[in-house]
Amino acid sequence: MRVRTMFDRIARTYSLVNTLTSAGRDRAWRRELVRMANVQPGDRLLDLGCGTGDLTAEFHRCGLSQMVGLDFARLMLEQAASRPTVPATWCQGDALRLPFVDASFDLISCAFSVRNFQNLTAGLQEMYRVLRPGGRLLILEFAMPEQRMIRQLYQFYFTRILPRLATWISHDTSGAYRYLPSSVLSFDHPQQLITQMNQCGFEQLITRRRSFGIVYLFRGLKRSTPAEI
C-alpha cells in the first residue's frame, strides 16, 4: 500500500523525471526492448507495471493495437489513459494475481517493475501462465554497475543527487525518490533473475547490459511444448 501511494503521488511528473534524470536514455532502453520483442502482426501485449504508458506507447509505434496496460497505481493509469494516441486497455491489478485466463498474450513487457514485486517467483509464474506457448517475456530493470569506479560514481549520483533532483522536479513529499535507490540496491543480481526465469520455465534467455551496467534488458520465451518429466 505504501509503495502504491508513492507512485500515485508522482504520477503527474513520472515520465518527465525519468527522462531528465536518465539524460534521455530511458527512451533508448525502451526502444531496444521493443526491438528484442520481435513484434509480429496480430500480437497481443500485456504491459505489466505500465506506469504512465511510455513503454506501451513504444510498442504501439511498432504497429501493435491489441494492448493491455496493467498497474497497481490508479493515478499512474489515469495518466496513461490520457494519451489520446495509444489505443490500449488500462487495468488496475496485482502482478502476483493477474486477472487474465491462461495463454492470453503473445508478449509481456515489464519495465522497472519486477524489483517491486513482493514475490518475484510468483510474479514470473503468473507471467508464464498468461503467455501463450512460444510467447515472449521482455524485462527492463535497473542494476548497479559491476566495475568498481563506475559503481562508486553512479552510487553517489543515484543516492545523493538523483533523489534530490527528482524530488525538486516532482514536488514529491512521499519519499518516492528515496525509495528508488534503496529498491535497486536491494534487488537481486541480474544473473539471479535469469536463474529464476529459467526455473519458472522460460527458455532461450537473452540478457543485454546497457549504460555501463545501470540497466539490463532480458528476454525469455515460454516453451512451445510442455517440458518432459
Image (tube, helix red, strand yellow):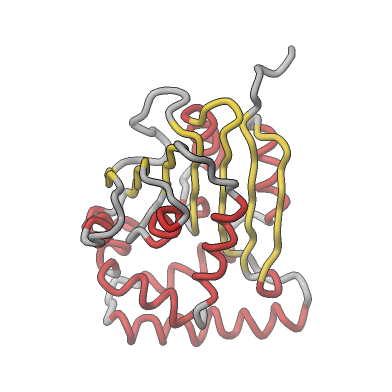
Q: In screen coordinates, is 66 left or right of 191? A: left
Q: How many marks?
A: 0
Measuring 45% from the left and 33% from the top, which residue is drawn there? 105
Is residue 163 depicted above or below 204 in this figure?
below
Q: Looking at this view, is 55 or 65 the one in front? A: 65
- Quadrant into which the C terminus falls: top right
User: Where does the image place residue 217, in percent across and percent down from the top left?
Assistant: 63, 57
User: Where does the image place residue 104, in percent across and percent down from the top left?
Assistant: 43, 28
Is residue 15 depicted above or below 98 in this figure?
below
Q: In screen coordinates, is 5 left or right of 150? A: left
Is residue 204 depicted above or below 179 in this figure?
above
Is residue 227 depicted above or below 32 in this figure?
above
Quadrant housing residue 65: top left
User: Where does the image place residue 72, in percent across and percent down from the top left?
Assistant: 31, 49
Measuring 36% from the left and 71% from the top, which residue is drawn there? 15
Measuring 58% from the left and 25% from the top, which residue is drawn there? 133
Q: In screen coordinates, is 201 left or right of 54? A: right
Quadrant housing residue 12: bottom left
Q: Looking at this view, is 51 or 144 the one in front? A: 51
Measuring 28% from the left and 44% from the top, which residue is drawn there? 89
User: Where does the image place residue 203, in percent across and percent down from the top left?
Assistant: 70, 35
The extreme top residue here reads: 229
Q: Looking at this view, is 11 or 44 the one in front? A: 44
